[in-house]
Image: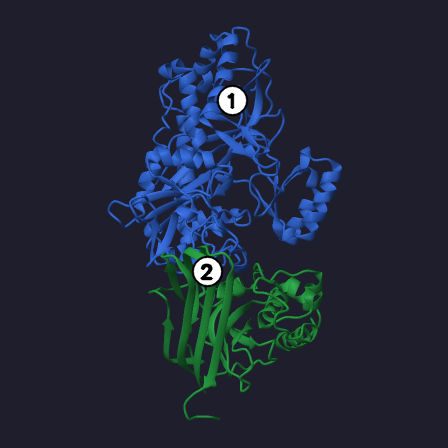
Amino acid sequence: MKLSIRHRTEYRYSERVRHSTQYLRLTPRPSRRQRILDWHLDLPERAERASDGFDNILHVLTLDQPHQGIELTARGQVEITDEDSEDDDDRLSPLVFARVSPLTGADPALIDLAESHLSTPVLERLERLSERILADMPFTPGATDVASDAISAYQGGRGVCQDHTHVFLACCRVQGIPARYVSGYLYSDDSEHVASHAWAEVWQDGGWHTFDVTNQTRRPRHHLKLAVGLDYLDACPVRGVRYGGGVESLKAVARVRQSGADHQ
Amino acid sequence: MRSLSLPEVSGYDEMIQPGGKVRDSYKGYHRWLLGQARDNLVRKRKEAELQFHRVGITFNVYGEENGTERLIPFDALPRVIPARDWRHLEAGAIQRVRALNHFLHDIYHDQAIVRDGRIPAEQIFGNSQYQPCMQDVDLPNQVYSQVSGVDLIRDGEGTWYVLEDNLRTPSGVSYMIENRRMMMRLFPELFAHQSVAPVEHYPSLLLETLQEDSGVAYPTVVLLTPGRFNSAYFEHAFLAQQMGIELVEGADLFVKDGFVYMRTTAGPQRVDVIYRRIDDDYLDPLAFRPDSMLGVPGLLSVYRQGNVVLANAVGTGVGDDKSIYPYVPEMIRFYLDEEPILSNVPTWQCRDPKALDHVLAHLPELVVKEVHGAGGYGMLVGPAASQAEIAAFRDRLKARPDNYIAQPTLSLSTCPIFVDEGIAPRHIDLRPFVLSGKESRLVPGGLTRVAMNAGSLVVNSSQGGGTKDTWVLEDGSC
């Protein structure tokens, strides 16, 4: 399936920002599952292209002239293939992803959740876990914010894809199962649906397996992967630090459409 | 002090032999001491205290009220190491740091030591000090720990042991230098009659080491400090001043087009080497803790590109973690094909159920430490603890055994300090500083820390420990 993506992020500040630096993870890396046909970033200034420790493509954007807003647009076309498995990425030990990260700590409630169905085989058990998480915390935009961690989101009983993924990762890590956070885009027929998305991958039997808790799917047929990491902080599309600026307002719109003639 | 009587010592004392005779290495000093008037010594000690206050060598203590500045007690009776002993320590410390640098390079590249089954994979990759962002990053000279503090102790027989390695941002070297200066100011005649090896050139060796790691011909080196509220701020300012380099905080630096720049009155200036005294977690708020304003946003991306040198490297903590310590002798054999010159203290890893059983059964005799702890916090000294303290610790240990290691309570050697009644023995340790650039070297000396309370084994300055000047006596003297 060919997808065309346009993702625009706009920051506005109540006062002038003297200096800002951002890490942008807005460029997908090609893999067996995703072919990048073309991709562009429209940025206020030239950014330095690098990679991070998880092999994500990273752009470093420094604005050292006073500014009152930042506009970032990522756009391009990709082809999502029908491959079942993800590239076996053996650069980093999967054991790194069994480690508890700042947003995936567990409290007794999450440990209980993690330890239900312990007797069933791993992937099946994780499917039930995924069902249970969505039932316990229905998809509710605005119930949490980007800084929410697994514990507080689960306590609140509502959340978005980021929270579902964090709770799922926390439970995997309680069991010592390596699992990672994926940030990306999701195509859906329903244009109202949020196109920026997050899901999880679990390391089992020598490969990464997808678990999209929010959409209750293990087949990433409509998923374009941007970045991976231990949690949101490692993989988020934009992470920045600014000096000055006062109050920030953010507008982000991601649009994912099916492109070309090969409607299926 | 003609009337000076030598105190009784038990265990190994650096100055006094069992039976009350002075060791050879202290003969010169002892002769001098007998010729000193008691009043004069008291006056000199007061003078030292005043001077240290004036210079501003103070130390913030965590866990006390904000802004508590305390003078680290200085004792004017030097700790003497004969040259022969020093050569042994020097070779042992260099060997250890070479092996540790090999280890760090290996686990961030091919991981041969894990594949060879010498260290379990989860001990490395599950360790929060292993930094994924360092995997496959190539460093100049393959040096990860340019500045290493190797903590040494002696047991009751006088045998040397390595207690721990410090490969992150080891501190204390300013006391080594300032204590020497103070001794020379107070007692210049002492140095006229004995050949005490100099330590004064440490800052220039440090600067050389830092420069050696840069591919730039005349690199700009800076010292990055968390700021004046940090407990070691005095040392940061001192070393920067001694090396003639800028002392900067995070906000003085920025990242642009793949390089690090320092804001100066003459415009941005490129920075090639950063001697950072900030922990990994605080270095770059875009890569590590987002709430930290101490670091430099974007720094890690420049570092990974090889356009700036950090000393020490990111991710050295996995080499000095207490859970990794038991493997250092194995690293020496594996990487250098040599036998360790200096021994480890025997260590039980509580993550191992058998070891845990042993530790739980012998808590009153053991020292139990948190794997990731530092500065003497979160530890149990069995013989000095009350029953209630031991019981409380037992619960913590059972709840998270993997978080603890245990060691026998070594008696630690003693060295006399000045007290009101004359001199009295106190427990000490030693931290020499190994500098690693193209090669490894150290100045002859180090930081001797003293547990100022009689019988105490805790020498950490954050826990009321003091310091002494450390003399390496060159051959032919005394």
For mark 2, name the chain.
A
Image: A71 above or below B356? below
Identify which residue, B3 or B39, lies in the foreground: B39
Q: Position of residue A44 (x, y in %)?
A: 36, 66
Of the 4 image quadrants, the one containing the C terminus of chain B is: top left
- The residue that label 2 is drawn on is A240
Pinpoint the chain carrying mark 1: B
Foreground mark, 2 or 1? 2
Q: Residue at horizontal 60%, vertical 17%?
A: B8
**Residue extending farthest left:** B217
Position of residue B277 measured from the top left corner of the image (x, y, whole percent): 44, 43
Camera sees residue B95: yes
Residue appearing at x 52%, y 15% in the figure: B21
Q: Which mark is residue B279?
A: none
**Residue pictured at 52% horizontal, 13% vertical:** B42
Looking at the picture, how far across and down is residue A66, in whole percent?
38, 57
Residue receiving disc 1 = B75
Q: Few, some or many C-alpha atoms within 10 Å of disc 2 (few <14, some 14-19, many ≥20)? A: some
Q: What kind of residue is marked 2?
A: Gly
Q: Which chain is green?
A: A
Q: Is A206 left or right of A132, judged from the image as shown?
A: left
* Colour-to-chain, blue: B
Q: Secondary structure at mark 1?
A: strand
Left/right placement of residue B214 relative to residue A76 reads left
Where residue A126 appears, as percent x and y from the top left, is: 63, 74
| Residue lying furthest front | A14
Mark 2 and mark 1, same subunit? no
Say if A168 sits above or below A261 in the image: above
The quadrant in which residue B446 appears is top left
